[in-house]
Every structure is written in C-alpha cells, then in structure tokens.
Amino acid sequence: MTEVIGVKFNNGGKHYYFSPNGVTVRAGDSVIVETSRGLELGTCVQGNHEVPDEAVVQPLRELARLATKDDLRVAEINKKREAEAFEICKQKIEEHGLDMKLVDVECSFEGNKILFFFTSDGRVDFRELVKDLASVFRSRIELRQIGVRDEAKMLGGIGICGRPFCCNQFLSDFHPVSTKMAKVQSMSLNPAKISGACGRLMCCLRYEQAAYEELVKAVPKVGAFVETPAGYGTVASVNILRSSLKVKLDGEGEDVFRSYEADEIAVIPGGRPKPGESFPSLLKDRPRPKREPERPEEDPWAAPQLFAEDTDSEERAPEEPKKKRARRTRAKKPADAAASPERQTGEKQKAQAQGAKRARRGGRRHRKPNAAAQGKPGAEAKQTSETKPAPEHREQRKPSGGSHRRSRPKNPGAEQSAPPSE
C-alpha cells in the first residue's frame, strides 16, 4: 500500500495521485505539486489515504508545498494573462485566415509557457501563427488540437436532460459509445435524441448498458415464435425493464394482441415448425409462476382530503325521523347500563316516577268531560260547540246527473238566517 493524495488541476479534469511527502493535506486545500510541465497549482480532492501499489503510476511525483497567499496571487495574475492571450490569439487566427476554432488557453504556474487548445476539421499549418504569438508574449507557445468531446468538457453546459454535462462534472475519461447500446435499450435511433451537445453519442448510454444486457437474456426477441397459455404466436413488442411482451396469437386476426410476462411463455427452439410438423409443448411441465396481488397505485397528483369521512351516515337509515332515533337511544341506555346494578336501580326509580306522572295526567284528562254532569257553568256550551252538527248544505247532494260536484248555494248565509217554512 502507498500513501497518496488526490489532486485536480481544473474542474473538468481527472485527479492524479501525488506523494504527500510527510505533509497532512485535507480535501479542499490548494497545493503546489511537481509535474512534467514544472510546478503547478492544484486543488486536493482526496486527503492522505492509502491505495494499492498497482493503482499508482510510477514515478510518483511529490508534493512541493501547500499554497501560500503569494501562490494564490500568482494564480490570479495568470488568469488575467489567459484572458488577454485568448483575445490576441483570436485576432491572429483571423489575420492568417486559418480554419480553426480557439477553445481555451492555459498559462503555466511559473509563467514560462502558454498552451492554446483549438478544434479543426482537418490538419492546420499554424507555424506562422506560433511565431507571431511568441513575439507578443515572449514565452514558449504550444498549440494543441483537441476533439469535440474535449471541447464540451472544457466549456461545460447543460445537456438535454437539464443537468450539467457529465464530462464536465465527474467523468475523468471518455469511454467508447456505440449505436448498439441505443438499440439494446430500445431507444430511438434519431441522431438528435441520442447525441449530446458535442455531436457525439451521449456518454450516459453506457451507464446502464450492463444492466440491459442482463435483462435482455431473460426476454425473447421481437419476431420469436413462442408458446403461451392461450396458444402459439409471434412476439410483436418487448418491454425490457418490465420483462413483459405482446404476442400475436395464430388465428386471432391481425389486430388482436395479448400481453404476457416473460416467465409465462416459452420460446420454441428453431422457430416456427414446418408445415405438417407438430408444435412442441413446453409449458406442460412448467409450474405456474406465483405473483403477489397488485396494489392500486396512489396518484401523486390527487388532491388531499380536506374533510373527514361521515361514518355515522352509513349506519343511520336515510329516511329515519329524528324522534325515532331519540327513542332508540333512550331504549339503549338501560341496556348499556346493565353492567352497573346501582345505575340500573336508579333508572328503574326514574321510570316509576315518570309512570306515576303520566297516570296522574291521564286521570285529569278523564275527569274533564264529567264537568257538565256536575253542573259547572259553561260546560254545556262548550260541549254543544264541540258537537255542533254540520250545515245542511254540506250533506245535500245533487241527484245523479251529468255533474258529480257538490251543490253549493250562492248565498249560504241567507239560508241559515231564513226561518223554516211550515
């Protein structure tokens, strides 16, 4: 095991191992290390830790010192020089009429070298350009041609997913990506959808490639001849992530499809048998897969319930009057209180008292009609008013004829006032 520290020189670059040289370094500290281009200022991303000897590239360079205030001030001056060198180089490229695009400029920490990065479709003769730049900056000039992927890594940006470029955030090296990965993942082969801002295939196609390769082994391909519980058919479409597929059954019509899970069907080896050959049955001895009942998925966009559910409304009858409910509750009270004998005796005493009151009231009501017999004044008048016969015109009816309505006199008051004729 070797003790090392991880140092990164820019945001889009990978980190390198250096020997701490007996100094304790923490993540986030600025350090000065020895490189092939001389002393360079970097940022520690991993503090003192041990790694296997195979992970270290020999010779392992050492840490020079922790960055001081003077070192940070020199780094700020170099950044200003880089901005000036970028504008001057763009003007020189236009003057020479070169077919190249300037991407970035880096100045060494010691200030004795300036590195220019550019992209171009072909080879560029920039010998005259180097001479002009050397005469302006009075230092060593180096022009390096890079690819479009390195350009996106240096400049950064936002991808079609809405997140910063992976190459600019955390990818240290570029891995090969092919269109076969897009086919395995059932993606559209439209270049606009599977290409990144650099114009090459997206690096994220490689992230889940290993998982897709394992899933593809358990699902038959489109066009395979399979046996299903409903018969034989041909696979029309496949959903790799869900391990499900759609099968067109033989003799069911062109537009009729059925969906199955991958473990519910069996692939016929050799494809569809020739005419006259019998179809092999592979699902006879296979046990049926046991599946858990699917739970209804909750809608994340459903509105929350603002009011509590009325549990009493289900128990009560919808047309039951309120009085009956009260009587039922009164009748239930003694049953609920049956557990306590003292409470039961109290309820019996109350019921007896109420019965006595009702009996008294009933006796008084029965005595009232006997007031006339005792000779009390006003009793006869009251009785006659209550037993007053109905007027005669109400009892009289027309003889059976065309109308069924009752005959009403035009002036009923006059008939009552007129004396009866002898």
Image (cartoon, rainbow, N blue to C red):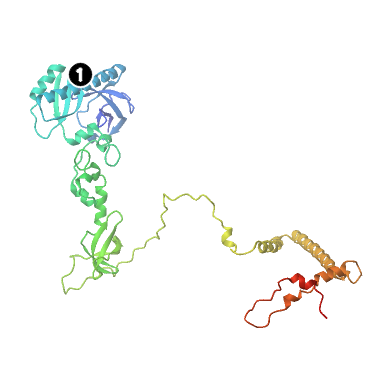
Does residue 180 appear to the left or right of 162 in the view shown?
Answer: left
- Residue 417, compared with residue 71, is above or below; it is below
299 on left or right of 48: right
Q: Residue 291: in sight, yes or no?
A: yes
Residue 375, picture quadrant = bottom right
Q: Residues within 10 Å of mark 1 (few under 14, many from 20)?
A: some
Q: Nearer the viewer, residue 105 or 36?
A: 105
Classify the position of the N terminus by image quarter. Answer: top left
Tell me if residue 218 can be seen: no
Percent position (x, y) of residue 277? Answer: 17, 73
* Number of numbered markers: 1
User: In the displayed structure, would residue 366 be above or below residue 33?
Assistant: below
Q: Identify which amino acid the numbered label 1 is placed on.
A: Gly
Which residue is identified by label 1? 111
Give the quadrant of residue 338. Answer: bottom right
Q: Secondary structure at mark 1?
A: loop
Q: Residue furthest right?
A: 375
Residue, far bottom: 400
Residue 398 versus residue 347 in the image, above or below: below
The C terminus sits in image quarter = bottom right
Which residue does the image show at 76% across and 76% down from the upper left? 392
